[in-house]
Image (cartoon, rainbow, N blue to C red):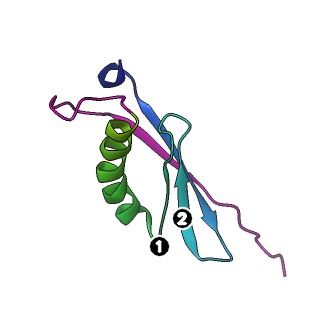
Amino acid sequence: MIDQEIIHVKAIWDNEARVWVATSEDVPGLITESENLEDMVQKLKTLIPELLEANGSISKFKRTEIPFHFFSERSEIASCK
């Protein structure tokens, strides 16, 4: 049941677009972007329940908390002089 699971969301930095892109295998259809991680978390708090409801995973009549684990990944290059 969804209110007993933890949703895993991963954000990867897109250097070309200069945004974080978040997806989740636990939430079908979830893909969103944001310029910073704080804004991303706020978007996810809205999108996760909306998408789970749209996918029939939770009832719109049942109030529930949906915990999610949000982690980010960014690769960079350090230069030696």
Q: Which residue is the site of mark 2?
A: 20
* SS state under label 1: loop
Q: Which residue is the site of mark 1?
A: 35
* SS state under label 2: strand
Of 80 and 33, nearer the camera is: 33
Q: Position of residue 32 (x, y in %)?
A: 48, 60
Mark toward the start of the polypeptide (1 vs 2): 2
In the image, residue 38 sits, relative to residue 29, either above or below, namely below
Q: Residue at x 84, y 82 (%)?
A: 81
Mark 1 neighbour class, 10 Å CA radius: few under 14, some 14 to 19, many 20 or more: some
Amino acid type, callout 1? Glu
Q: Position of residue 56 (x, y in %)?
A: 36, 31
Q: Residue at x 53, y 42 (%)?
A: 24
Q: Which residues are magenta?
A: 56-81
Of 43 and 81, nearer the camera is: 43
Q: Residue at x 15, y 31 (%)?
A: 61
Of 73 and 6, nearer the camera is: 6
User: Is the Cβ of the residue at disc 1 closer than 8 Å to that at disc 2?
Assistant: yes
